[in-house]
Structure formats: structure tokens, C-alpha cells
């Protein structure tokens, strides 16, 4: 099935590059985000072709299903002025170009580094178990929760701190606002909520 | 000849299977839609649709013709491409998930190892149909509906994810077929009643079953959580500008998602195609009948909830999702993991 795999590789690769270009060039910011989603999905397809099925679906669940939705959410709410955005984008183009070049250089070094320094690969990477012997998830879990448990937990802690920080920064308790306390409402009984008075006629309460 | 036997023939077989499955599924969805209206009517002491065909059995097909033959209207200020793409996204994604659903032993289009993750991933994309439709309509009501829906579906996905993790801990596999196999023995066998419906996960993971059911209601925008299309506040929410075929596709996508959630509840908690008693008179009935019966039962519960329960307020919905379901399901993941680790129960595939 190698021919078919190559065909799908070219389809996914072409779509992801074309969509990535459209992210930059489309006039409407919402369209940009929609093309970004298309890029993510085709990247997931590329993962799938290399046999990393778990990573592919996690990419879809996390990036497409959660992160990109928040992007879309924010961009739709902002109602951006696109003409001003174009001008500023040209202002920032040199910085973007520098970041792009640095990223490209890093990628080239990362991919080809082990070719020039073969001992690096054996020093860092664990041997990859064959796909037939162990499923993606088992292989990933066996490494992530044993050898790299500290890094895994630290990454979780960083995210946790970020989440709490965001809540602390935005949470304000106003004094004069009536709040609904579900526990108190549920705990009310006729005995605590109702008072029965015997009203004599013509006197009022 | 080599190419034919290697590529073309398997592709044709898969295409044929998928087409057959889709046709059966669409007819099933048509009748599920009718059942929804009939149950709702029965609760309110009405007759429901009863004119087209005997007992109104062809009502859904009449509706289909009505929608398809109407003229589609696109608002002048709408974003045309996205406006037309949104219902397509909704319906295609909802139908695509069924590729991995096993309706009987071995009756599945794609028996992949990470089936449940695939279902979870694709159903997490279904919110895009709603958001895109709501934004592209360029209308206040539609946009408010889309925003509500985005927050709601993302919130309840979290607890659905944890419920699925709990089941996976007990099963030891992400394959949907294996999830059903794992329910052949369980709590019922331990209690001394083997081969019964007590073995299924609904009993051993009962709190998760309840959480999953309610989250499924919220995830599919069913009443009492149908705030994205709350007609008393938002007219029809994200669908307000839609008519004719695009509207029908939204409806189809919605009911396909509901059917999927019923199938998923059946597979995760009600033993899939397994008969309720694994001995002679019950094992004569084929698995697909049991599967459909269970899906119908779960859908009946969906329909009854719609008929009984008044709509939630939006802050109550968010409170339920984040402050009750999320801690509860997270705690259950920890508890179940501990129990399985300490006792050595659970399966491995």
C-alpha cells in the first residue's frame, strides 16, 4: 500500500501548506482561523500516515477541538478592523521573518543533527518499540509515566498555575450583588422559610 | 490484476459497506426523529404526526421532501462560503463518527485500535458547524447561540472525556469492540450472577453512567440544555437564518449526533450487542437487534428528558458542568484507578 500512502502524503502535505499560506493571506481573520484549523487537521493526517495515530487524534482533540475553538471565539467577538491590521502586519514583517528563519534553522539542526553527530541519537532517545508489538498509547504511556514522570508532572503544574493565575486576575467579588447559593436554596425547608402568623381581623401584620 | 486485488477491490467493498451502513443509518435517524416527536406528543396527551402514512410513519420523509424542494435563502450580509459550509460540516462530521461504531460482533466499517478516541475527536469538532453557522449568518441571535454553544460543548466535552477514561481504565483498550467484550464479565459475575446484564458497566460505574447521560444531552444541545437554540430567548439560535436544505442538514447532523451518543452509551455502559441474559432464548436473537433495542431505550430516555425537564438557565448549565460533573468525574477516575490497581480487577487486551 506504499503508493497509496505516498498519494495521501502528498494530498495532506499540499493541503496543509496551502492552508497555512491562506492563514496569512486571507483578508478575513475568521477565515484565517478556519484555514488554521484545516492546517491542524491535515497535520493530523500526516501524523496518521507515519503511524502515530494517538498523536494525530490528540492533535485534533486538543488543538482543533479546544484551542482553535477559543481562537475562533475571540476573533469572532473582536470584530477586527482588517485594514489597520494589514498596515501593522507590514510593520512587524521583519521580526516575523527573523523568527521564521530561526525556527527553520532550528528545525534543520534538529532533523539533520543526528546525521552529523550520530552518538547524540543514542544518548537521548529510547529505542522505539515496533508498532506491531505495542500500540501507540501503551508505548507513549510506558515512557511518559515512568522515565519522564517528573517533566510530565511539572508541565501539568505549569498549566495549573497559569489557570489559577488567570482566575485570580479576573475574579472580582462585588459586595452589593445578590448571588444564588444553590446549597442554601436546597437546604431550605418549610420550617426555615415560612412563618405562619395568626392575623387578627382588621389589624394587619 | 495486482492493482485490482490490492486497491480497487478492497476500496469497492469498503465503499459498498459504508453506503449500506449510511442508508440504514439515515432511515434509522428518520424514525428516531419521528419517535422523538411521538414521545413528546404522548407525554403532552397529543397524537403527534399521524397523517402521512399509517400512524404517521412516513412523516420524516415528507419533511425531507418539503425541505429539499423549498428555495434556499441566503441573507444578503451573510458570509456565503462559511454559511453554506457550516451545515455540511455538521452533517458530515456527525455521520463520519459512525465508521467505528460496532453494531454487532464484527459488524463495523473500521475496527481501529483507537476507536473511542476517534469518536471523541470527531465529536469534539461538531461544535464547528454551530459556530460557523452562527457567525456566518451575521445576526445577533445566531451569533449569541453560537457563542453559547461553543462554551457549552467545550465544557461538557471535558467531563465526557473523563467518563470515557474511567471506562477505558476498566477495559484496558480503546477499541470499541473490545470495550463490549470486556463487559462479558464484571460485577454481576462477582456477585454470583454471571452472564447477565449486571456484568455491564452501567452498574459498576453507575455514577459515571449518569454523568455521561447528562453530558451527552448537553453535548448534543438537547433539552434541557438546548440553550444555543432556545426559542424563547434566541428565536432559533444559530439556525435562525437557515431554511430549506441547509436547515435540514443541521437537523440531520443534530439527530445523527444524538443517535451517536445513544450508540456510545450503549457500547460504553449497556454492553453493546450483548444479550441481557447470555443463555438460550436470548442468545437466539442476533446481536444487532439487541444493539438497536438498547439504542432505542437510551433514545427513549433522551426523549423523555426533553418532555419532562424545563430548560436550564445558562449559568446553572455552566455550574453543573464545571463545578459538579468535572470534580465528580475526576474523582471517579482516581478512585477507579486505585481500585483497579489494588484489587487487580479489570481487563487487559
Image (cartoon, coloured by chain):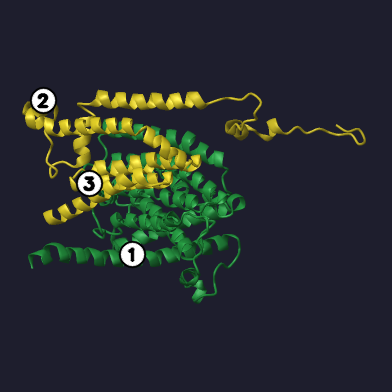
**Residue B86 makes an appearance in the image:** yes
Calculate the distance from the C-alpha at mark 1 to the C-alpha at mark 3. Answer: 27 Å
Q: If the image is split into quadrants, where does the C terminus of chain B sit?
A: top left
- SS category of the residue bearing label 2: helix
Indicate the position of residue A201 as horizontal and vertical percent values: 91, 36
Calculate the distance from the C-alpha at mark 3 to the C-alpha at mark 2. Answer: 27 Å
Q: Nearer the viewer, residue B36 or A97?
A: A97
- Residue at the location (34% across, 49% down)? B122
Residue at the disc numbered 3: A46
Between circles 1 and 2, the one closer to the viewer is 2
Dot 3 falls on which chain?
A: A
Indicate the position of residue A162 as horizontal and vertical percent values: 40, 25
Contact check, label 1 and label 2, Cβ < 8 Å: no
Colour in which chain B is drawn = green
- Residue at the location (49% across, 76% down)? B53
Residue at the disc numbered 2: A123
Q: Is residue B51 left or right of residue B200?
A: right
| Same chain, labels 1 and 3 | no
Which mark sits nearer the N-terminus, 3 or 2? 3
Q: If the image is split into quadrants, where does the N terminus of chain B sit?
A: bottom left
Disc 2 crowd, CA 10 A, few/some/many (<14, 14-19, 20+): few
- Residue at the location (46% across, 46% down)? B214
Colour in which chain A is drawn = yellow
Residue at the disc numbered 1: B22
Disc 3 crowd, CA 10 A, few/some/many (<14, 14-19, 20+): many
Q: Is residue A165 left or right of residue B345?
A: right
- SS category of the residue bearing label 3: helix
Dot 1 falls on which chain?
A: B
Amino acid at each position: 500500500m506504499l503508493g497509496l500512502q505516498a498519494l495521501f502524503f502528498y494530498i495532506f502535505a499540499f493541503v496543509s501548506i496551502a492552508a497555512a499560506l491562506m492563514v496569512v493571506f486571507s483578508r478575513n481573520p475568521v477565515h484565517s482561523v478556519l484555514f488554521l484549523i484545516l492546517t491542524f487537521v491535515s497535520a493530523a493526517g500526516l501524523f496518521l500516515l507515519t503511524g502515530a495515530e494517538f498523536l494525530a487524534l490528540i492533535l485534533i482533540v486538543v488543538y482543533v477541538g479546544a484551542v482553535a475553538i477559543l481562537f475562533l471565539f475571540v476573533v469572532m467577538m473582536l470584530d477586527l478592523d482588517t485594514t489597520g491590521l494589514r498596515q501593522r502586519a507590514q510593520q512587524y514583517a521583519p521580526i516575523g521573518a527573523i523568527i521564521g528563519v530561526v525556527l527553520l534553522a532550528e528545525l534543520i539542526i534538529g532533523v539533520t543533527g543526528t546525521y552529523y553527530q550520530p552518538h547524540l541519537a543514542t544518548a537521548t532517545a529510547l529505542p522505539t518499540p515496533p508498532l506491531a508489538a505495542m500500540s501507540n498509547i501503551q508505548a507513549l504511556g510506558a515512557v511518559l509515566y515512568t522515565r519522564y514522570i517528573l517533566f510530565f508532572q511539572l508541565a501539568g503544574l505549569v498549566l495549573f498555575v497559569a489557570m489559577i493565575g488567570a482566575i485570580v486576575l479576573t475574579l472580582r467579588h462585588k459586595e452589593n450583588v445578590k448571588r444564588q447559593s444553590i446549597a442554601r436554596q436546597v437546604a431550605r425547608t418549610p420550617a426555615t422559610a415560612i412563618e405562619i402568623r395568626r392575623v387578627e381581623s382588621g389589624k394587619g401584620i | 490484476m495486482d492493482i485490482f486485488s490490492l486497491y480497487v477491490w478492497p476500496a469497492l467493498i469498503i465503499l459498498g459497506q459504508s453506503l449500506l451502513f449510511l442508508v440504514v443509518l439515515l432511515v434509522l435517524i428518520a424514525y428516531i426523529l419521528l419517535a422523538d416527536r411521538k414521545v413528546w406528543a404522548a407525554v403532552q396527551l397529543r397524537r403527534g404526526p399521524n397523517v402521512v402514512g399509517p400512524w404517521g410513519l412516513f412523516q420524516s420523509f415528507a419533511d425531507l421532501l418539503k425541505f429539499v424542494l423549498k428555495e434556499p435563502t441566503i441573507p444578503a450580509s451573510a458570509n456565503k462560503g462559511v454559511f453554506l459550509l457550516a451545515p455540511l460540516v455538521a452533517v458530515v462530521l456527525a455521520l463520519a463518527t459512525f465508521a467505528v461504531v460496532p453494531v454487532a460482533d464484527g459488524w463495523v466499517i473500521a475496527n481501529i485500535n483507537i476507536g473511542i478516541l476517534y469518536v471523541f475527536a470527531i465529536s469534539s469538532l461538531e461544535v464547528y458547524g454551530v459556530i460557523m453557522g452562527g457567525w456566518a449568518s451575521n445576526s445577533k441571535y445566531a451569533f449569541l447561540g453560537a457563542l453559547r454553544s461553543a462554551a457549552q460543548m467545550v465544557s461538557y466535552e471535558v467531563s465526557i472525556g473523563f467518563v470515557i477514561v474511567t471506562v477505558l481504565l476498566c477495559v484496558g483498550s480503546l477499541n470499541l469492540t473490545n470495550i463490549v467484550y470486556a463487559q462479558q464479565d464484571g460485577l454481576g459475575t462477582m456477585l454470583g450472577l454471571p452472564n447477565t446484564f449486571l456484568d455491564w458497566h452501567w452498574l459498576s460505574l453507575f455514577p459515571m453512567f449518569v454523568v455521561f447521560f447528562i453530558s451527552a444531552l448537553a453535548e448534543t444541545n438537547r433539552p434541557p440544555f438546548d440553550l444555543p437554540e432556545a426559542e424563547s430567548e434566541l428565536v432559533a439560535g444559530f439556525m435562525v437564518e437557515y431554511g430549506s436544505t441547509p436547515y435540514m442538514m443541521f437537523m440531520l447532523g443534530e439527530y445523527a449526533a444524538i443517535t451517536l451518543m445513544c450508540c456510545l452509551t450503549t457500547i460504553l455502559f449497556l454492553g453493546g450487542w450483548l444479550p441481557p441474559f447470555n443463555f438460550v432464548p436470548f442468545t437466539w436473537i442476533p446481536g444487532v437487534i439487541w444493539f438497536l433495542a438498547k439504542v432505542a431505550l437510551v433514545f427513549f430516555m433522551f426523549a423523555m428528558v426533553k418532555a419532562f425537564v424545563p430548560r436550564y438557565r445558562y449559568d446553572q448549565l455552566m455550574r453543573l458542568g464545571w463545578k459538579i460533573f468535572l470534580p465528580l468525574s475526576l474523582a471517579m477516575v482516581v478512585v477507579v484507578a486505585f481500585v483497579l490497581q489494588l484489587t487487580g480487577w479489570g481487563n487487559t487486551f
